[in-house]
Structure formats: structure tokens, C-alpha cells
Image (cartoon, rainbow, N blue to C red):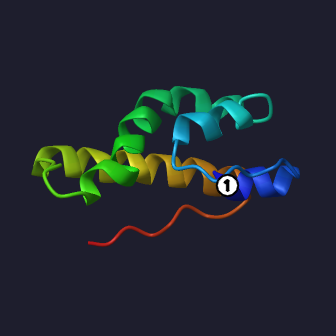
Amino acid sequence: MKALLEELGVHIPKTHDLNDLQKLLAPYHASLRPLKRGLLFLTDFAVDVRYPGNRTSKRQAVAALRWAGRVRDSCRTLLGLRPARRRK
């Protein structure tokens, strides 16, 4: 998402809040709007689960990876790049 902001020449804030980044991109890339729910979900994984006492379930981790893949693929498409190859 920050690469998209860079390509647009928009100031890139120092943040892990993906929803904030989506708000900055919204005027330029409406196709990212359907990812909002996933971005909110992923933002919790940016920092919270790194600290002792904050845990996540395997189910949540799998969901986070799925959302991250969707976001990455969408951003790569907008940047004119092919979607990343998936590991088997």
C-alpha cells in the first residue's frame, strides 16, 4: 500500500494502520474499498501479536494470511505487477 502511495507522490506516513493507508488511497484506487474489513483485521496483527500475552489462534493466523494475500495481489495489480506466486 505504501508503494501505491509512493507511485502517486503522496506523503507516506509512518504507520502500521492499514485502514489509514486505505483512506489515503481511496480517492485514487476505489478498488481497495472492498478490502476494508480485512485491513482492519490485519492492522491488529501488525503490532499486537508481537507482545507477550497477546496471542492469536491458528484460525486467525490463517485468515490474516488470506487477507494479506488479497491485499498484496490487489496492490500488485494496481502497480502493474503480476500477482505473487503462491507456495504449494
Where does label 1 land, which residue? 2
| The image quarter in which residue 83 lies | bottom right
Q: Residues within 10 Å of mark 1 (few under 14, many from 20)?
A: some
Q: Residue at x 37, y 53 (%)?
A: 47
Q: Residue furthest front?
A: 52
In percent of width and height, residue 63 lies at: 26, 44
The residue nearer to you, when weighing 52 against 78, is 52
In percent of width and height, residue 60 lies at: 19, 44
The residue nearer to you, when weighing 53 against 59, is 53
User: Quadrant where the C terminus lies?
Assistant: bottom left
The residue nearer to you, when weighing 27 against 56, is 56
- Name the residue type under label 1: Lys
In the image, is residue 13 above or below residue 52? above
In percent of width and height, residue 48 lies at: 30, 48
From the viewer's perspective, tell me whether residue 19 is left or right of residue 30. Answer: left
| The image quarter in which residue 87 lies | bottom left
The number of numbered badges drawn on the structure is 1
Q: Residue at x 42, y 53 (%)?
A: 69
From the viewer's perspective, tell me whether residue 40 is left or right of residue 13. Answer: left
From the viewer's perspective, tell me whether residue 81 is left or right of residue 8. Answer: left
| The image quarter in which residue 85 lies | bottom left
From the viewer's perspective, tell me whether residue 61 is left or right of residue 22. Answer: left
Q: Residue at x 50, y 66 (%)?
A: 84
Q: Residue at x 80, y 34 (%)?
A: 28
Under tag 1, what secondary structure? Answer: helix
